């Protein structure tokens, strides 16, 4: 249905930036791609694998995540961890997120018009 | 034995730069392995699980391009407008020039009318296709070359198109008139070489203008006519301004002064032509020369004044907020 597709599109737009923030916060404890995907989805932060894996790679390239191969288990896995600059970005994004949430709440209640 | 996973990783990694392949392959294997495990956990047989996992991942090329941000379009939004504007500009300029050039060449070589039209249209088409192809190719390569930044043209309000108002519509008539006249003039300069003088109903194979002038002056005049055509197009697009009116003075002087000098010093016409028309015409000679000089100078002066009048009217119009 048309309306549903429109809604879905907008919801995706809205979520796009929050996935980055969720990753940066979640990866304060190192983890690998699939585990991250599972835990985010379990929390209700719905991410597509085809979005998450390329995102991790990009964040690493930007120096926001560091990575290390863990070869102790049967299959080698790449563990990502939030870097100091990733922490700074997470703080900035969180502040912004709160500010927007606040502003929206006030708009909604008609407090600020 | 190569597994499906091996083949998948190979297919996806192939499109990446060599330096990234090994790392990418490892990452992808990890991801595929985890997806397979998930399927097995849900009770699938290992072989089916691998197949299902790869189906889930989808087209390896698409997957690889999402990893390295490779554009999946020929020309992305960054260059699209620049590409589009340049292409339109080139098509509008180059195709007509090529067509006129070919037409002129055919006229000179005396081709048949049908052949002339066919060749001209054919050339225009092929020039258009070539333009589209090469311009697009360059932009597609740019799109795929990381690091190269072409100065994407910054937009300024000056580029806003004039609304298709009366002003431009009115100028369209001028444009068509100018282009037709100038083209005919240029063709006439070439054509006179092959004889356009009829005596007693018979065409004489003599040129009107002195063939010696081909070494410089006739090409010079034809070049000027081409410039005048460009000028007429610019006038059509932009309208008259003081700058354009001043340029118009230059163009007129550049044409009229040498032409009159050649005429008055007797270098303009071919001796055979002068002979064929029984020049000099006794008492009428002086009057004829005077009238011709008067008309030629008059046309140039009138054209110059016309340019300034239109420029003045234009400026007044825009100051009042409309023409």
Image (cartoon, helix red, strand yellow):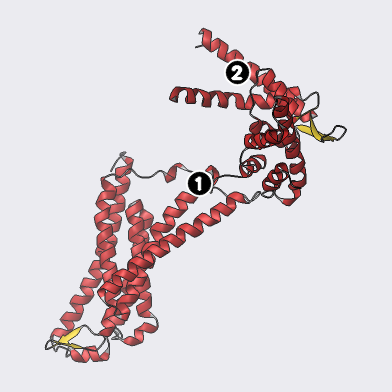
The image shows residue B320, relative to residue A9, as above or below, that is: below
| Disc number lying in front (1 or 2) | 1
Assign the C terminus of chain B to one quadrant of the image: top left
Residue assigned mark 1: B80
Farthest residue to the front: give it. Answer: B45
- Front-most of residues B119 and B201: B119
Classify residue B257 as left or right of residue B58: left
The image shows residue B12, relative to residue B219, as above or below, that is: above
Circle 2 Cα neighbour tier, 10 Å, few/some/many (<14 / 14–19 / ≥20): few
Instruction: Judge if badges 1 and 2 mark residues of a common chain.
Output: no
- Front-most of residues A50 and B8: B8
Instruction: Residue A8: give x, y in percent of width and height.
Output: 52, 24
Within the image, what quadrant is residue B49 found in?
top right
- Front-most of residues A48 and B57: B57
The alpha-carbon separation of the residues under discs 1 and 2 comes to: 33 Å
Secondary structure of the residue carrying tag 2 is: helix
- Residue B237 badge: none
Instruction: Residue A41: give x, y in percent of width and height.
Output: 67, 21
Residue assigned mark 2: A100
The image shows residue B30, relative to residue B72, as above or below, that is: above
Residue at horizontal 33 percent and vertical 73 percent from the top: B104
The image shows residue B275, relative to residue B306, as above or below, that is: below
Farthest residue to the left: give it. Answer: B200
Circle 1 Cα neighbour tier, 10 Å, few/some/many (<14 / 14–19 / ≥20): some
Residue at horizontal 71 percent and vertical 47 percent from the top: B10
Secondary structure of the residue carrying tag 1 is: helix
Chain of residue at mark 2: A
Chain of residue at mark 1: B
């Amino acid at each position: 249905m048309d309306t549903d597709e429109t809604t879905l599109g907008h919801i995706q737009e809205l979520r796009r930036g929050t996935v980055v923030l969720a990753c940066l916060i979640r990866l304060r404890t190192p983890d690998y791609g699939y585990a991250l995907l599972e835990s985010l989805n379990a929390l209700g932060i719905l991410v597509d694998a085809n979005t998450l894996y390329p995102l991790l790679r990009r964040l690493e390239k930007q120096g926001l995540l560091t990575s290390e191969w863990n070869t102790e288990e049967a299959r080698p896995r790449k563990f990502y961890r939030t870097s100091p600059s990733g922490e700074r970005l997470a703080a900035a994004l969180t502040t912004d997120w709160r500010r927007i949430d606040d502003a929206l709440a006030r708009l909604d209640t008609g407090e600020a018009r | 034995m190569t597994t499906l996973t091996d083949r998948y990783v190979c297919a996806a990694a192939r499109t990446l730069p060599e330096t990234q392949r090994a790392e990418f392959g490892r990452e992808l294997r990890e991801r595929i392995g985890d997806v397979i495990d998930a399927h097995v956990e849900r009770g699938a047989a290992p072989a089916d699980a691998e197949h299902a996992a790869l189906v889930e991942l989808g087209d390896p090329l698409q997957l690889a391009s999402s990893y390295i941000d490779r554009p999946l379009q020929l020309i992305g939004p960054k260059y699209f407008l620049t590409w589009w504007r340049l292409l339109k500009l080139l098509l509008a300029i180059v195709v007509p020039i090529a067509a006129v050039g070919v037409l002129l060449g055919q006229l000179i070589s005396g081709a048949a009318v049908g052949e002339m039209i066919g060749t001209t249209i054919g050339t225009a088409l092929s020039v258009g296709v070539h333009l589209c192809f090469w311009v697009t190719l360059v932009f597609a390569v740019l799109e795929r070359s990381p690091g190269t930044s072409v100065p994407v043209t910054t937009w300024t309000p000056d580029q806003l198109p004039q609304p298709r108002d009366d002003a431009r519509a009115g100028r369209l008539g001028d444009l068509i008139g100018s282009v037709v006249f100038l083209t005919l003039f240029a063709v006439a300069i070439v054509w006179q070489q092959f004889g356009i003088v009829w005596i007693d109903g018979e065409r004489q194979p003599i040129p009107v203008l002195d063939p010696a002038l081909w070494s410089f002056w006739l090409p010079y005049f034809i070049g000027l006519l081409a410039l005048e055509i460009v000028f007429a197009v610019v006038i059509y697009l932009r309208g008259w301004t003081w700058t354009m009116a001043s340029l118009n003075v230059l163009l007129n002087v550049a044409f009229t002064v040498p032409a009159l000098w050649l005429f008055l010093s007797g270098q303009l016409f071919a001796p055979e032509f002068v002979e064929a028309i029984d020049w000099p015409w006794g008492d009428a000679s002086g009057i004829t020369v005077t009238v011709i000089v008067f008309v030629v100078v008059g046309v140039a002066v009138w054209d110059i004044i016309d340019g300034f009048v239109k420029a003045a009217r234009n400026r007044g119009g825009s100051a009042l907020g409309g023409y």
